[in-house]
């Protein structure tokens, strides 16, 4: 087996004068879960489409499972399971037929497809909906069917663009558990997500993007230590600007987001002492997490 599952080297992609991916390089090792994080418009979906050979880069080289892409993308795609950002199921077909058609697309025999359908229905918790048409499914059920469909050909690599968006918290946790079992079986996953808990729990390494460029990369806990490295106090209520002045001497960094003040401090007790007894204030002291890293790196503005 190749020592690299995905190799992106100096990849560029523009749409008109908009640069979507700006000289990006990264590698994903076999068996690894590699996460792409970034605000809306950062280039994540463009990257996943380029991995699949569905979007052609303007410059740079891409190798997927040892095959040059897009030149030989068809060959690579036989061993890839795809979850696109937006479901593209066949609405007129039933759940079972969608799985069946997809299996046949991968040249599986009728017997092979029939053999895997029960486990895929179980994976998606859709056994009771097997003969329902896709139009009759809820949004989360459609998403689960898209996830199951990606596994029909027992792919070596999964390319998943926001796989759990639209799922309820219970279904999301179930999907995490199942993705972990796929990783335990040696599968490789390229994943984009806006759920920081998902990234923290599933990904071995993360690449944080902004404007098509890599702004940080590493293991989730290493990124948290490097980028934050101290306790966080969330402060609600009160006038953020007045409070900011009060706690500034005791904080490493302070950020205001909406009505909340985020205070990063290595001695949080000193900050809390300043604020205790103030009417209407609520304090939450906690260890730093990946959301702090994301917001610290990409700012608190909405991606354009
Ligand atoms: N087909 C297209 N035509 C023109 N511009 C595009 C096209 N696809 C993407 N873009 C632009 O490229 C940039 C990156 O888009 P992309 O969809 O890759 O972002 P993303 O990181 O997946 O965002 P999101 O989190 O919202 O899904 C955006 O500025 C977007 O407007
Ligand atoms: Mg996207």
Image (spheres, rainbow, N blue to C red):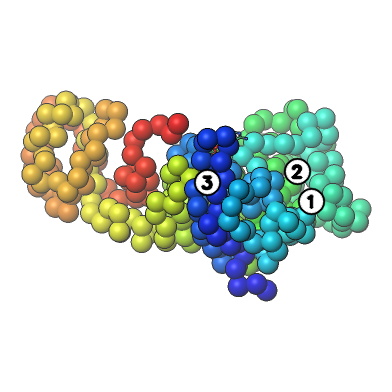
Q: Residues within 10 Å of mark 1 (few under 14, many from 20)?
A: some
Which marked residue is nearer to the observer: mark 1 or mark 3?
A: 3
Give SS at disc 2: helix
Q: Are marks 1 and 2 in contact (CB under 8 Å)?
A: yes
Can you identify the residue that label 3 sits on?
A: 21
Can you give x and y, in whole percent of width and height, for residue 237 in the image? 21, 27
**Front residue (pair 235, 23):** 23
Give SS at disc 3: strand
Can you identify the residue that label 2 sits on?
A: 127
Q: CA distance from mark 1 to mark 2?
A: 8 Å
Q: Residues within 10 Å of mark 2 (few under 14, many from 20)?
A: some
Q: CA distance from mark 3 to mark 2?
A: 40 Å
> Which residue is painted at 68% across and 36% down in the image?
87
Can you identify the residue that label 1 sits on?
A: 118
* Mark closest to the chain's N terminus, 1 or 3: 3
Q: CA distance from mark 1 to mark 3?
A: 40 Å
Q: Residues within 10 Å of mark 3 (few under 14, many from 20)?
A: many
Q: Quadrant of the C terminus?
A: top left
For residue 257, which quarter of the picture? Answer: top left
């Amino acid at each position: 087996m190749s020592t690299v599952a995905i190799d992106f080297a100096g990849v560029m992609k523009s749409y008109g004068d908009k640069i979507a991916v700006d000289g990006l390089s990264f590698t994903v090792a076999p068996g690894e879960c590699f996460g792409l994080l970034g605000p809306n418009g950062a280039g994540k979906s463009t990257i996943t489409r380029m991995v699949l050979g569905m979007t052609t880069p303007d410059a740079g080289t891409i190798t997927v499972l040892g095959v040059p892409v897009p030149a030989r993308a068809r060959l690579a795609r036989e061993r890839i399971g795809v979850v696109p950002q937006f479901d593209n199921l066949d609405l007129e077909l039933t759940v079972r037929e969608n799985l069946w058609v997809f299996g046949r697309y991968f040249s599986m025999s009728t017997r092979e497809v029939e053999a895997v359908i029960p486990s895929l229905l179980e994976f998606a918790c859709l056994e009771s909906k097997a003969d329902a048409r896709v139009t009759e499914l809820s949004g989360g059920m459609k998403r689960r069917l898209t996830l199951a469909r990606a596994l029909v050909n027992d792919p070596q690599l999964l390319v998943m663009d926001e796989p759990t968006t639209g799922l309820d918290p219970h279904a999301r946790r179930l999907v995490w558990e199942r993705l972990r079992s796929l990783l335990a079986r040696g599968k490789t996953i390229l994943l984009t997500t806006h759920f920081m808990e998902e990234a923290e729990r599933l990904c071995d390494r993360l690449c944080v993007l902004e404007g098509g460029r890599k702004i940080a990369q590493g293991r989730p806990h290493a990124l948290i230590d490097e980028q934050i490295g101290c306790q966080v106090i969330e402060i609600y209520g009160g006038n953020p600007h007045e409070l900011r002045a009060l706690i500034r001497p005791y904080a490493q960094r302070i950020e205001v987001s909406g009505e909340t003040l985020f205070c990063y401090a290595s001695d949080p007790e000193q900050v809390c002492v300043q604020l205790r007894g103030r009417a209407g204030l609520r304090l939450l002291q906690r260890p730093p997490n990946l959301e702090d890293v994301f917001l610290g790196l990409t700012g608190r503005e909405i991606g354009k």
